[in-house]
Amino acid sequence: MSRGGGVGITNAVNVGIAVQADWENREFISNISINVRRLFDFLINFEATTKSKLASLNEKLDTLERRLELLEVQVGTASANPSLFT
């Protein structure tokens, strides 16, 4: 009779260990999921910020290119008409 009782306790202990391991695995998976989500959010924000900064730089470059073209025309005009400098 004691063997039957011992097997029941052993099974209960084994089930308890399995439940504990399952909870630890779930907690680990939850932590991984949370960190993946944080990384994903960071990358989305990084992409948006980067696109915004690149768009701003592109606008500034466009402005500088237009100014440079204007200066090139002015220098070309002045070179063609040296009398403008006298």
Image (cartoon, grey):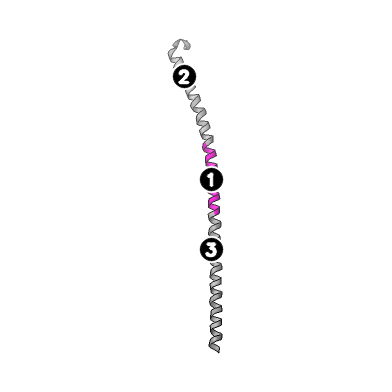
For image coordinates 53% across by 66% down, the residue present is: 25
Q: Position of residue 38 (x, y in %)?
A: 55, 53
Please name the residue that numbered disc 1 is placed on.
46
Q: Position of residue 74 (x, y in %)?
A: 48, 18
Q: Look at the numbered disc 2 and give the secondary structure of its residue.
A: helix
First of labels 2, 1 by sequence position: 1
The numbered mark at residue 28 is 3
Q: Hey, what amino acid is under mark 1?
A: Phe
First of labels 3, 1 by sequence position: 3
Nearer to us in this view, 3 or 61 = 3
Residue bounds of the magenta highlight: 37-54
For image coordinates 54% across by 86% down, the residue present is: 4
Give above or below for 64 relative to 51: above
The numbered mark at residue 73 is 2
Give above or below for 13 relative to 46: below
Q: Quadrant of residue 35?
A: bottom right
